[in-house]
Structures are given as structure tokens and as C-alpha cells.
Amino acid sequence: MHKYIIMGPAGSGKGTQAKLLCKGYDLVHISVGDIFRWHIGHKTKLGSKVQRYLNQGRLVPDEMVADVVKERLGIHDWRYGFVLDGFPRNAPQAEFFLESFDIDAVIALELPEEAAIERMQSRRLCQGCGLDYNLIQLRPKVPEVCDNCGGRLLPRDDDTPDAIRKRLADYREKTAPILKLLQEKELIVSVDATPAPDVVQAEMRQRLGLVEVEEPVPVGV
Ligand SMILES: [Zn+2]
């Protein structure tokens, strides 16, 4: 059983890394963002509540996030463990959560601000089908045209450098007390998110003790 929390600023590839880790070890990816998106897409009661906050440009309240996570973990479909993404949202939640669940480690993806800005500015969104492109790593076959539906690819409205800097600063401010608490409990495993996704993943697995470090093969024996 492996129970992890993953944290990282926008642009750190948190979702991708969580998915890769889950795939490799049969873990369940519990993403608060995905759960909310599902509810919005299926027009549930919770979805319309979340949509209202987003429309007002506000964050979904921490307690609401906690309820969703509690309910999701209560399904108990995570036989081999989980990777929790988007929770805890504040230090008291973290404290309470750690008392209830025996977390193995908290993966903290680290990305310098300039790299995060560059990555987020290279994002493109299809106006037709909503597919997400990253012009550094996932390029469309024809520039500015969606591979999937032929729609036009445009940057997101909220991906201006100033808006990105503000989001990163908000993220740092909000996560600092959580990280401090987790640091005290010696749960943090920091991973540099700058390299390519497969390199980051390999580094993460090694740091988590999931793979043995290969001994170099002696030459000429
Ligand atoms: Zn498209």
C-alpha cells in the first residue's frame, strides 16, 4: 500500500506525474480538480455550486474540498493506495488528514518561477473541442490547428505573465504553512520538475524508494 500526496505549482506537470505514478503502481489518482470538473460536466448540484465560485473568480472553500476528498476516499477502491492531488488546502486540514491516514510521503514538485511562466504561456486550448496543447511538449501537427477537430488553438485568457505571477504568488502563500508542517513531520520528498516528464517520473520513483538504484555495470569484467 502506497499513500501519497502530490503538490506543485501550476506548470509543474503535477497531473501528468500523478497519473504516471498511479499507472506504474496500480494506485488511484484522486484529483480534486478532476472531481470538480466531472461534477460541472454532469451538472450535479455540487457542480453548480463549484461553477458559481469559479464564475465569481473565487476559490472553492477549503471545507467543501475536504468534504469531497473525504467522500472520495470513503469509496475504498484504492486497494494498492492513492495519489491525492489538490488537498490538503490549509495546515489544520493537513494536520487532521495526517492523523486519519498513514501517508507515506508528500511529493513536492519544484519549478523555478520563470520556467513555470514559460510553460504556462506556451499552453494552447482548442476552441473547438477543448483539447489542451503545450507548445513546448505537445505540439499540434499543423501550427495553431487542433489535431483532433481542426479547431483553432488559442492561448488561455488567463495566461498573461502578470496573471500567472499572481497565481504563483497566491499558491506559494497558501501552501507555505502546509509545507512547513509537512517538513516538520519529515514527509516531504522534493523533486525537480524542470526536466522532461519521464525524467521527473524516474527521479520521483527513485526518491520514493520504489525502484532500486541500479549499480553501474563494471566495465571489462
Ligand atoms: Zn479540437
Image (tube, rainbow, N blue to C red):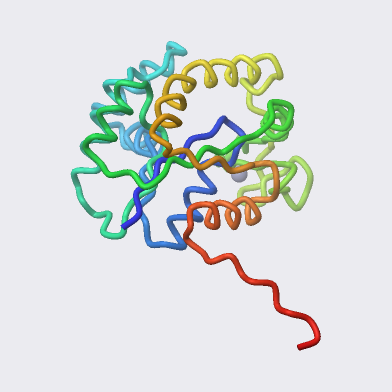
> As drawn, which residue projects farthest toward the top?
56
Q: Nearer the viewer, residue 60 or 18?
A: 18
- Answer with the quarter of the image where residue 97 lies: top left
Is residue 7 rendered to the left or right of residue 109?
left
Q: Against 147, is 168 above or below? A: above
Percent of width and height locating residue 202 = 59, 57
The C terminus appears in which quarter of the rendering? bottom right
In the displayed structure image, the side of residue 89 where residue 141 appears, left or right: right
Vertical arrangement, residue 22 with respect to residue 221, above or below: above
- Which residue shows up at 69% across the image and 37% down it? 152
Position of 119 compared to 13: left or right? Answer: right
Q: Position of residue 88 (x, y in %)?
A: 36, 29
Question: Does 123 appear above or below 212?
Answer: above
Q: Which quadrant of the render holds ligand 1? A: top right
Q: The N terminus is located in which quarter? A: bottom left
Query: Could you tell me which residue is drawn at 47 percent across and 60 percent down?
Result: 210
Q: Could you tell me how many numbered marks the image carries?
A: 0
Q: Position of residue 114 (x, y in %)?
A: 74, 27
Q: Is residue 180 left or right of residue 130?
A: left
Q: To which quarter of the image does residue 38 belong?
A: top left
Q: Residue at x 45, y 31 (%)?
A: 183
